[in-house]
Amino acid sequence: MTRPTSADVRRYWNAHIHDLEISPHQPGTPEFFADLDEYHFEKLHHLLRLVDFDAWKGRDVLDVGCGAGVEVVRFARGGARTFGVDIAEQAVALTRTNLAQQGLTAGLAVADGEALPFPDASFDYIFAHGIVQYAADDARVVAECHRVLRPGGTVLFQVYNRISWLNVLSKLMKTPLEHEDAPVLGRYSIGEFRRLLAPFAHVEIIPERFPVRSRLHKGWKGALYNTFFVGAFNALPRAWVRRYGWHLLAICTK
Protein backbone atom coordinates (compact mmCIF):
# COMPACT_ATOMS: atom_id res chain seq x y z
CA MET A 1 0.00 0.00 0.00
CA THR A 2 1.35 3.44 -0.99
CA ARG A 3 2.10 5.69 1.96
CA PRO A 4 -0.03 8.90 1.98
CA THR A 5 1.79 12.11 1.09
CA SER A 6 1.39 15.69 2.28
CA ALA A 7 -0.47 16.38 -0.98
CA ASP A 8 -3.01 13.69 -0.04
CA VAL A 9 -3.40 15.26 3.40
CA ARG A 10 -3.88 18.74 1.89
CA ARG A 11 -6.57 17.55 -0.52
CA TYR A 12 -8.50 15.87 2.29
CA TRP A 13 -8.43 18.83 4.69
CA ASN A 14 -9.41 21.31 2.02
CA ALA A 15 -12.61 19.30 1.68
CA HIS A 16 -13.11 18.44 5.38
CA ILE A 17 -12.45 21.50 7.56
CA HIS A 18 -12.81 20.32 11.14
CA ASP A 19 -16.16 20.85 12.95
CA LEU A 20 -17.89 22.78 10.13
CA GLU A 21 -20.99 20.63 10.54
CA ILE A 22 -21.71 21.62 14.14
CA SER A 23 -23.31 24.94 13.19
CA PRO A 24 -26.54 25.46 11.23
CA HIS A 25 -25.16 28.80 10.03
CA GLN A 26 -23.24 29.44 6.84
CA PRO A 27 -19.46 28.99 7.31
CA GLY A 28 -17.81 32.38 7.55
CA THR A 29 -20.72 34.18 9.22
CA PRO A 30 -20.42 35.66 12.73
CA GLU A 31 -23.03 33.16 13.97
CA PHE A 32 -20.97 30.28 12.59
CA PHE A 33 -17.79 31.39 14.34
CA ALA A 34 -19.69 31.93 17.61
CA ASP A 35 -21.09 28.39 17.40
CA LEU A 36 -17.65 26.98 16.59
CA ASP A 37 -15.99 28.68 19.57
CA GLU A 38 -18.77 27.57 21.94
CA TYR A 39 -18.69 23.95 20.76
CA HIS A 40 -14.90 23.79 20.69
CA PHE A 41 -14.46 24.78 24.32
CA GLU A 42 -17.49 22.79 25.45
CA LYS A 43 -15.93 19.63 24.04
CA LEU A 44 -12.36 20.63 24.91
CA HIS A 45 -13.05 22.45 28.18
CA HIS A 46 -9.73 21.23 29.58
CA LEU A 47 -7.89 23.55 27.16
CA LEU A 48 -9.04 26.56 29.16
CA ARG A 49 -7.18 25.06 32.13
CA LEU A 50 -4.06 23.98 30.25
CA VAL A 51 -3.61 26.95 27.91
CA ASP A 52 -3.54 30.53 29.19
CA PHE A 53 -4.45 32.43 26.03
CA ASP A 54 -3.77 35.75 27.78
CA ALA A 55 -0.28 34.86 29.04
CA TRP A 56 1.63 35.58 25.80
CA LYS A 57 1.03 39.30 25.36
CA GLY A 58 3.85 40.81 23.33
CA ARG A 59 5.37 37.40 22.63
CA ASP A 60 5.46 35.20 19.54
CA VAL A 61 2.89 32.40 19.27
CA LEU A 62 2.39 29.91 16.43
CA ASP A 63 -0.77 27.85 15.85
CA VAL A 64 0.11 24.88 13.62
CA GLY A 65 -3.02 23.57 11.92
CA CYS A 66 -5.14 26.60 12.79
CA GLY A 67 -8.36 25.34 11.18
CA ALA A 68 -11.03 28.04 11.29
CA GLY A 69 -8.96 30.12 13.71
CA VAL A 70 -10.64 29.49 17.06
CA GLU A 71 -7.35 29.54 18.97
CA VAL A 72 -5.69 32.12 16.70
CA VAL A 73 -8.46 34.56 17.68
CA ARG A 74 -7.99 33.82 21.38
CA PHE A 75 -4.21 34.28 21.30
CA ALA A 76 -4.51 37.47 19.23
CA ARG A 77 -7.16 38.86 21.58
CA GLY A 78 -4.77 38.19 24.47
CA GLY A 79 -2.13 40.41 22.83
CA ALA A 80 0.26 37.78 21.46
CA ARG A 81 2.06 38.31 18.17
CA THR A 82 0.17 35.43 16.65
CA PHE A 83 0.84 33.44 13.48
CA GLY A 84 -1.41 30.67 12.17
CA VAL A 85 -0.61 28.10 9.50
CA ASP A 86 -2.69 25.34 7.99
CA ILE A 87 -2.10 22.89 5.16
CA ALA A 88 -5.59 23.68 3.77
CA GLU A 89 -6.18 26.91 1.89
CA GLN A 90 -9.85 26.85 2.91
CA ALA A 91 -8.93 26.79 6.60
CA VAL A 92 -6.63 29.80 6.28
CA ALA A 93 -9.36 31.70 4.42
CA LEU A 94 -11.81 31.00 7.26
CA THR A 95 -9.27 32.11 9.86
CA ARG A 96 -8.71 35.35 7.96
CA THR A 97 -12.46 36.01 7.96
CA ASN A 98 -12.74 35.13 11.65
CA LEU A 99 -9.98 37.58 12.58
CA ALA A 100 -11.48 40.36 10.45
CA GLN A 101 -14.88 39.97 12.11
CA GLN A 102 -13.25 40.19 15.54
CA GLY A 103 -11.21 43.27 14.58
CA LEU A 104 -7.97 41.37 15.23
CA THR A 105 -4.77 40.83 13.27
CA ALA A 106 -2.44 37.83 12.99
CA GLY A 107 -0.01 36.48 10.44
CA LEU A 108 -1.39 33.65 8.32
CA ALA A 109 0.05 31.27 5.76
CA VAL A 110 -0.86 28.11 3.92
CA ALA A 111 1.93 25.80 5.07
CA ASP A 112 2.66 22.18 5.89
CA GLY A 113 3.61 21.40 9.49
CA GLU A 114 6.35 19.19 8.08
CA ALA A 115 8.07 22.23 6.52
CA LEU A 116 7.29 25.35 8.55
CA PRO A 117 8.25 28.57 6.72
CA PHE A 118 10.07 30.19 9.65
CA PRO A 119 13.69 30.56 10.77
CA ASP A 120 15.00 28.56 13.69
CA ALA A 121 13.99 29.77 17.16
CA SER A 122 11.16 32.07 16.00
CA PHE A 123 8.45 31.39 18.63
CA ASP A 124 7.98 31.40 22.38
CA TYR A 125 4.89 29.17 22.32
CA ILE A 126 3.50 26.72 19.75
CA PHE A 127 -0.01 25.31 19.79
CA ALA A 128 -0.11 22.09 17.72
CA HIS A 129 -3.42 20.52 18.67
CA GLY A 130 -4.77 17.71 16.47
CA ILE A 131 -2.01 17.85 13.85
CA VAL A 132 0.53 15.13 14.49
CA GLN A 133 -1.92 12.23 14.13
CA TYR A 134 -3.04 13.38 10.67
CA ALA A 135 0.42 14.12 9.25
CA ALA A 136 2.08 12.07 6.54
CA ASP A 137 5.26 12.17 8.68
CA ASP A 138 4.46 12.71 12.36
CA ALA A 139 8.11 12.80 13.47
CA ARG A 140 8.82 15.54 10.94
CA VAL A 141 6.06 17.74 12.38
CA VAL A 142 7.53 17.30 15.86
CA ALA A 143 11.04 18.08 14.58
CA GLU A 144 9.83 21.24 12.81
CA CYS A 145 8.05 22.51 15.93
CA HIS A 146 11.22 21.87 17.92
CA ARG A 147 13.29 23.74 15.32
CA VAL A 148 11.20 26.94 15.26
CA LEU A 149 10.74 27.04 19.06
CA ARG A 150 13.06 29.24 21.09
CA PRO A 151 15.19 27.66 23.86
CA GLY A 152 13.04 27.55 26.99
CA GLY A 153 9.87 27.81 24.89
CA THR A 154 6.82 25.56 25.16
CA VAL A 155 4.81 23.46 22.71
CA LEU A 156 1.43 21.90 23.33
CA PHE A 157 0.83 18.82 21.19
CA GLN A 158 -2.33 16.68 21.14
CA VAL A 159 -2.84 13.22 19.65
CA TYR A 160 -5.40 10.44 19.99
CA ASN A 161 -4.98 7.75 22.62
CA ARG A 162 -5.07 4.25 21.15
CA ILE A 163 -5.84 2.78 24.60
CA SER A 164 -8.90 4.94 25.25
CA TRP A 165 -12.61 4.77 26.00
CA LEU A 166 -13.56 6.22 22.61
CA ASN A 167 -11.44 3.83 20.59
CA VAL A 168 -13.09 0.89 22.37
CA LEU A 169 -16.60 2.37 22.15
CA SER A 170 -16.18 3.02 18.42
CA LYS A 171 -15.37 -0.62 17.80
CA LEU A 172 -18.17 -1.95 20.05
CA MET A 173 -20.83 0.34 18.56
CA LYS A 174 -19.45 -0.01 15.02
CA THR A 175 -19.46 3.78 14.75
CA PRO A 176 -16.56 5.31 12.83
CA LEU A 177 -14.42 7.92 14.49
CA GLU A 178 -14.52 11.48 13.22
CA HIS A 179 -12.23 11.81 10.17
CA GLU A 180 -11.57 8.08 10.11
CA ASP A 181 -11.51 8.41 6.32
CA ALA A 182 -8.54 10.81 6.44
CA PRO A 183 -5.39 9.69 4.57
CA VAL A 184 -3.65 9.33 7.94
CA LEU A 185 -5.23 8.83 11.38
CA GLY A 186 -2.62 7.88 13.96
CA ARG A 187 -3.42 6.60 17.43
CA TYR A 188 -0.70 6.34 20.06
CA SER A 189 -0.08 4.75 23.42
CA ILE A 190 1.40 7.04 26.07
CA GLY A 191 4.78 5.35 25.61
CA GLU A 192 4.70 5.74 21.83
CA PHE A 193 3.78 9.40 22.14
CA ARG A 194 6.57 10.03 24.62
CA ARG A 195 9.12 8.41 22.28
CA LEU A 196 7.90 10.60 19.41
CA LEU A 197 8.60 13.68 21.56
CA ALA A 198 12.19 12.65 22.34
CA PRO A 199 13.72 15.88 20.88
CA PHE A 200 12.34 17.91 23.81
CA ALA A 201 14.15 18.41 27.10
CA HIS A 202 11.03 18.00 29.22
CA VAL A 203 7.70 16.35 28.38
CA GLU A 204 4.54 16.14 30.51
CA ILE A 205 1.77 13.96 29.06
CA ILE A 206 -1.80 14.57 30.25
CA PRO A 207 -4.70 12.30 29.23
CA GLU A 208 -7.88 14.32 28.70
CA ARG A 209 -11.12 14.41 26.65
CA PHE A 210 -13.59 12.32 28.61
CA PRO A 211 -17.19 11.81 27.40
CA VAL A 212 -19.32 14.91 26.86
CA ARG A 213 -22.71 15.13 25.14
CA SER A 214 -22.34 14.93 21.36
CA ARG A 215 -24.07 17.23 18.87
CA LEU A 216 -22.81 15.22 15.91
CA HIS A 217 -24.16 11.72 16.52
CA LYS A 218 -27.87 11.20 15.93
CA GLY A 219 -30.31 8.28 16.05
CA TRP A 220 -30.47 5.57 18.70
CA LYS A 221 -26.70 5.36 19.05
CA GLY A 222 -26.44 9.07 19.75
CA ALA A 223 -29.33 8.91 22.23
CA LEU A 224 -27.80 5.94 24.04
CA TYR A 225 -24.44 7.66 24.21
CA ASN A 226 -25.79 11.00 25.44
CA THR A 227 -28.43 9.60 27.81
CA PHE A 228 -26.60 6.74 29.47
CA PHE A 229 -22.94 6.41 28.61
CA VAL A 230 -21.79 9.99 29.28
CA GLY A 231 -23.29 10.07 32.76
CA ALA A 232 -22.21 6.55 33.71
CA PHE A 233 -18.61 7.02 32.60
CA ASN A 234 -18.22 10.38 34.30
CA ALA A 235 -19.61 8.95 37.55
CA LEU A 236 -16.56 6.69 37.79
CA PRO A 237 -13.68 7.96 39.96
CA ARG A 238 -11.36 9.88 37.64
CA ALA A 239 -8.33 8.06 39.09
CA TRP A 240 -9.68 4.79 37.64
CA VAL A 241 -10.13 6.08 34.10
CA ARG A 242 -7.71 8.98 33.70
CA ARG A 243 -5.22 7.16 31.49
CA TYR A 244 -8.02 6.18 29.08
CA GLY A 245 -8.86 9.73 27.96
CA TRP A 246 -9.29 9.99 24.18
CA HIS A 247 -6.81 12.86 23.91
CA LEU A 248 -3.18 12.76 24.98
CA LEU A 249 -1.84 16.27 25.48
CA ALA A 250 1.86 16.90 25.85
CA ILE A 251 3.36 20.06 27.27
CA CYS A 252 6.94 20.11 25.98
CA THR A 253 9.83 22.41 26.79
CA LYS A 254 12.90 22.94 24.63
Image (cartoon, helix red, strand yellow):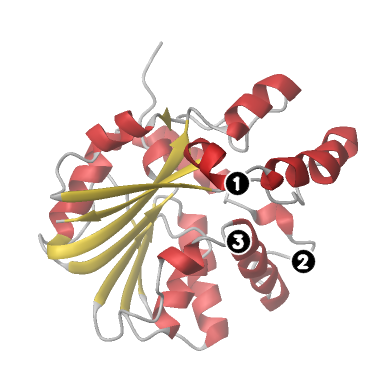
Residue drawn at x 72%, y 75% as measured from the top left = 31
Instruction: Answer whether labels 3 and 2 touch (C-beta < 8 Å).
Output: no
Q: Amino acid at mark 2?
A: His
First reached walking from the N terminus: tag 3 or tag 1:
3
Q: Residue furthest top?
A: 1
Dot 2, how many residues are within 10 Å of its Cα: few (below 14), some (14-19), or many (20+)? some
Marks 2 and 1, how far apart at CA: 27 Å
Residue assigned mark 1: 210
Q: Earlier in the sequence, mark 3 or mark 2?
A: 2
* Left or right: where 186 falls relative to 138: right
Label pair 2/1, CB-CB below 8 angstroms: no
| Residue at (80% x, 62% y) in the render | 24
**Disc 3 to disc 1, C-alpha distance:** 14 Å
In which quadrant of the rendered image does the N terminus lie?
Answer: top left
Specify whether residue 180 is in view. no
The image quadrant that residue 165 belongs to is top right
Mark 3, secondary structure of its residue: helix
In the foreground, 65 or 89: 65
Nearest to the eye among marks 3 and 1: give it.
Answer: 1
Task: State the CA–CA distance, disc 3 to disc 2.
Answer: 16 Å
Where residue 140 sits in the image (x, y, percent)? Answer: 23, 39
Residue 45's x, y, as percent?
57, 62
Task: Indicate which disc residue 25 carries.
Answer: 2
Residue receiving disc 3: 40
> Residue visible at 33% across and 80% down?
55
